[in-house]
Structures are given as structure tokens and as C-alpha cells.
Amino acid sequence: MICLVGSGNVATWLLQRLRGCPDFPVAQVYSRQMDHARAAAAIVGAEAVDDPAQLDPRCRIFIFALRDDALPQVLSRIPFKMPFAVHTAGSVPQETLAPHAEHYGVLYPLQTFSKNTDMSALKVPLCVECDHAGPHRELLMSLAGALSDTVRLLNGDQRFYAHLASVFACNFSNAMCVVAQDILQQHEMSLDLILPLLEQTVTKLQTLPPREAQTGPACRGDEAVMGRHLQALTDPRWQEIYRLMSDFIQGNTLYNSENQ
């Protein structure tokens, strides 16, 4: 049996994937807000709890899908030592669980989740780490295999840098789409105009290294266009981002002199 601690985006994906999985039934779902716990638990027909002291020590695996800063607080309120506990964070050492569990590990899904969207077709690489080889690592690998077709056994440093790279590739690029949407809306256009461009940008990365796929005025060294762009930007923060990114592109790694 599994006890899932959390009811957010990652927890919801886990529950959707584990629904109907006979090898890994979910017995309990915890959230500090009972209505959230009930909504998440309903996905798999599990018991909903809002107090860590109510967690069932008979559960085989405890999965913590929480914000990084919430994990220590919840762990400190569990009144027993868990047989096997794993967390789903990208940057939290697995040893955080050591005082609270006989065995411990990490099940880090390297993907962006929004529980109010359809996550059924998501491709989710799972990064797995365990305190030592043996039955518990085999159990964790088996659980990972039930959740995803892509499972990677990584050490803590590798997982940390995979998370760092993901912040650049996903979180920062999405933040730039926020700026793009604001610019478009200011001029009576919508984000769907550039969605094909974004799709092609990602598609190219399946066949080209990012350095070779780079295009745009900074890559071409088109100072006239960049000057007009800077003058048109209404937010000084956007101007600073534009300058920094253009300078980066025009550095030794991305600037393509052949396109001048």
C-alpha cells in the first residue's frame, strides 16, 4: 500500500497514473486542507487525512509530493519511523528523509504539471535515487516503471543539476512567454499567434543542438532591429532582459557571424 503525502500538481499526476494499478494501491492521501485531501483521494478511492499523525504505519511506501519548504514540517509531525519513504523534489537531498524512515529515496518526475489540465498523455522521465542497492531500490524502480516508460537512476548531484537545467529550459522560458503575451495583448493580439513558433522551436531540438538551432536578430548581429525593439519595450525590466539575452546570444557560444 502507498500513502501519498500531498495533493498538488505532482500528487495529482501520481494519483492519475496509479489509479487502477493493482501492484501499487494507494491507501491514504494527506493534505493539510481536508477538502483538498478528499478531492485527491477520490481519484483512487483512498482515505483522506489532514493530520500527519493519522498516517498508517502499515503502508509500504510513503511518497512525499510537497513543496520543498513544507517537507521538514510534515516529517516532524509523523509519530513513527516509516519503513520506506521517498520524496519527489528536484533539489532536496534524499538524506532529508533519513531520520524519519528506515529506508529512503527519491522519485523525481522531470516534467511540468498543472493539475487543471489533461495530464494523461504526458511523457514524464522519472529520476530515481535510493539510499542503497537492494530490495527497496528494486521496489522503487518497479514503482517508477509502473508510472513511466522512461526511468533514470541518478545520484543526488545529477538530479540537482537536472533540476537546475530544467529551471532554465522550462521555468525561465515560460516566464518569457508571459512577457510575450503581455506585449501581444497590449497591441490587440493573442498568444496563439506565436504558438506554432514555440512548437517549432521545441521540435527543432529533437534534431539540432540548441546552439545550432538559434535564430533571431541577436544571432544575426542585426543591431538596427535590436535597437528598435529596445525602444519599443515599455517595461525597463523587459529592456534589461532583452539586453542580457542578446548579449548572451552574441557571446562566443551562440553568435553566428555567417548570418550578419
Image (cartoon, rainbow, N blue to C red):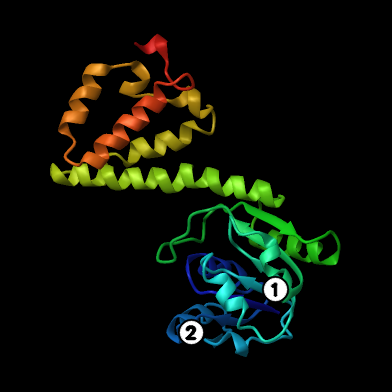
Q: Which residue is found at the position 66% from the left and 50% from the top?
A: 150
Kindly identify the amino acid type of the residue bearing the numbered disc 2. Answer: Arg
* 226 lies left or right of 72: left
Residue 201: name its quadrant: top left
- Return the disc, 1 or 2, that comes first in the chain's sequence: 1
Q: Secondary structure at mark 1?
A: loop
Front residue of 72/30: it is 72
Kindly identify the amino acid type of the residue bearing the numbered disc 1. Answer: Phe
Mark 2 burial class by Cα count in 10 Å: few <14, some 14-19, many 20+ = many
* 162 lies left or right of 168: right
Residue 101: name its quadrant: bottom right
The label number, if any, that marks residue 251 in the structure image: none
Mark 1–mark 2 Cα distance, whole angstroms, equals: 19 Å
Q: Position of residue 49 (x, y in %)?
A: 55, 87
104 lies above or below 204? below
The label number, if any, that marks residue 38 in the structure image: 2
Q: Secondary structure at mark 2?
A: helix
Mark 1 burial class by Cα count in 10 Å: few <14, some 14-19, many 20+ = some
